[in-house]
Image (cartoon, rainbow, N blue to C red):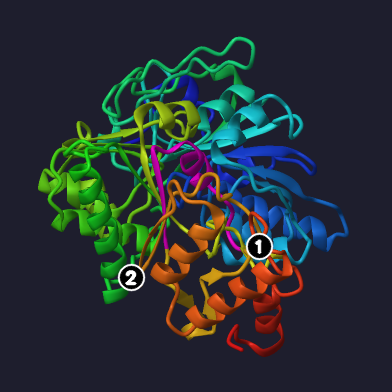
Amino acid sequence: MSRIANAEFRSKVCSAEDAAKIIKNGMNVGFSGFTGAGYPKAVPIALAAQIKEAHERGEEFMIGCLTGASTAPEMDGVLAEVDGISYRMPYQSDPIMRNKINAGISGYQDIHLSHSGPQAWAGFMGKMDVALIEVTAITETGELVPSSSMGNNTLWLEAADKVILEVNSWQSIDLYGMHDVYQHNALPPNRIPYPLVSASDRIGTPTIKIDPAKVVAVVETDAEDRNTPFKPLDDESRMIAGHLLDFLSNEVKQGRLPKNLLPMQSGVGNIANAVLAGLMEGPFENLTSYTEVIQDGMVDLLDSGKMTIASATAFSLSPEYANKMNDNAAHYRDKIILRSQDISNNPEMIRRLGVISCNGLIEADIYGNVNSTHIMGSKMQNGIGGSGDFTRNAYISTFVTPSTAKGGAISSIVPMVSHHDHTEHDVMVVITEQGLADLRGLSPAKRAKVVIDNCAHPDYKPMLEEYVAAAAKASNSAHTPHDLNKALSWHARFLETGTMKA
């Protein structure tokens, strides 16, 4: 049966190839999609084929690509492969897209996720020509049932001149009722506070209202999301999770957190998912989450009853858990709320609710500055995503990482980060398998000692201590001692020799 219950929308059904022809060279396109969930799956492939044909004829054809976050090979990958993206924001994780960015073929702007929608809606990136949005269904009254992510969808639909919809029957029809669609967007000076006072609040409707006159094409699909398996829990991940659980337990004991903690945020990835798995074994009950994505570990917490509600903007599930969600979406409707990322990542909401953030990093330095985006200072990995939204505004901000990478050739704790994403002013806790550094209330010199003592790998600890001594001498023990001749020498050594070890 068709998921399109409205006759006017059914009259606009066409092939992906015909829909793709609406998108022209130089246009800005707002795509749905957030961490491999809810992205369009047919039209981008057809568009990539048309771009390739145009290039073979010697014609220019590139578009601006704006999303909620990362997508998948069927979108970012195929468009990047044909050199079809001139501008990309705000976050990506596709290897082909990453290579095009680092080769200078595609321009990329790394933006806080909470900033991306409002900035685009305000016109900072130029006119929004087309919105290409995946939905689960279209109701009889012409309203859109969102799919497995909300992201920037409502903003793109409002801002775009034309709208193309993909109606994906793979997405569970029982997702209806899981979303909280709040369509009261405004730019300064007309913004009003979001009336949320807890992670469990619903302030909107289950569907998106749209002007049907803007919809120029509807494409029916039946294709699954990109769902990446998580690595099995290893000893290193368990140790990191254990350090965080011990820290949280002590915060409760000291009276700084309630027994059920405060709303939890978990970044994307294996380590963050391992931390969620660790909460399964912890003493905490009646947990809540106010975060970006629902990962496997969070589903387990909901199933166990340890977590009562999870608020996010998208799923980021393994294939096994994606099928589980599709089969049991009706069961999870009262436990999961999917909101627009302008709300899920809203700095004021994060601060008011007192969120405890937990994110990964590429490297941290001895003073607590964090690089979460660039390899060796220059090459973009994925982007800052929502980590800045949560870190800057969290009640307690934590970062988790193994202490080394590349088989020990790289230390995750360095004298100075090669790129700054999160400054020492926002980073409260750094955790590796070696231990936990609580940086709250510490001056830079004391921070350095705690980070080195607790988080650095034994192979690199003497080198870090040697650097601290040299930096104190070179700077005459200034407030934040650095020896600028040696601060990035570890990175330079790695680029020259393949290891940071002296």
Q: Which residues are magenta?
A: 381-400
Residue at screen point 66% across, 60% down: 419
Numbered tag placed on residue 15 in the rendering: none
Instruction: Categorize mark 2 by other alpha carbons within 10 Å: few (<14), some (14-19), many (20+).
Output: few
Instruction: Categorize mark 1 by other alpha carbons within 10 Å: few (<14), some (14-19), many (20+).
Output: some
Residue at screen point 52% across, 76% down: 411
* Helix, strand or loop under label 2: loop
Q: Is residue 384 magenta?
A: yes
Q: Is residue 325 magenta?
A: no
Q: Is residue 341 visible?
A: yes
Residue flagged by tag 2: what amino acid is it? Answer: Lys
Tell me the quadrant of the picture where the C terminus can be found: bottom right
Mark toward the start of the polypeptide (1 vs 2): 2
Q: Which residue is mark 2?
A: 231
In the rendered structure, the answer to whether residue 156 lies left or right of residue 260 reads right
Name of the residue lying farthest toward the top? 190
Q: Quadrant of residue 161?
A: top right
User: Does residue 404 lie above or below 177 as drawn?
Assistant: below
**Measured from the top left, where is residue 254 in percent x and y?**
22, 43
**Measured from the top left, where is residue 313 in percent x and y?**
41, 38
**Measured from the top left, where is residue 213 in percent x and y?**
59, 17
Tell me the quadrant of the picture where the N terminus can be found: top left
Residue flagged by tag 1: what amino acid is it? Answer: Ser
Q: Marks 1 and 2, how far apart in space? A: 44 Å
Q: Quadrant of residue 401?
A: bottom left
User: Does residue 313 lie above or below 433 as drawn?
Assistant: above
**Residue 274 versus residue 449: which sits nearer the camera?**
449
Q: Which residue is mark 1?
A: 477
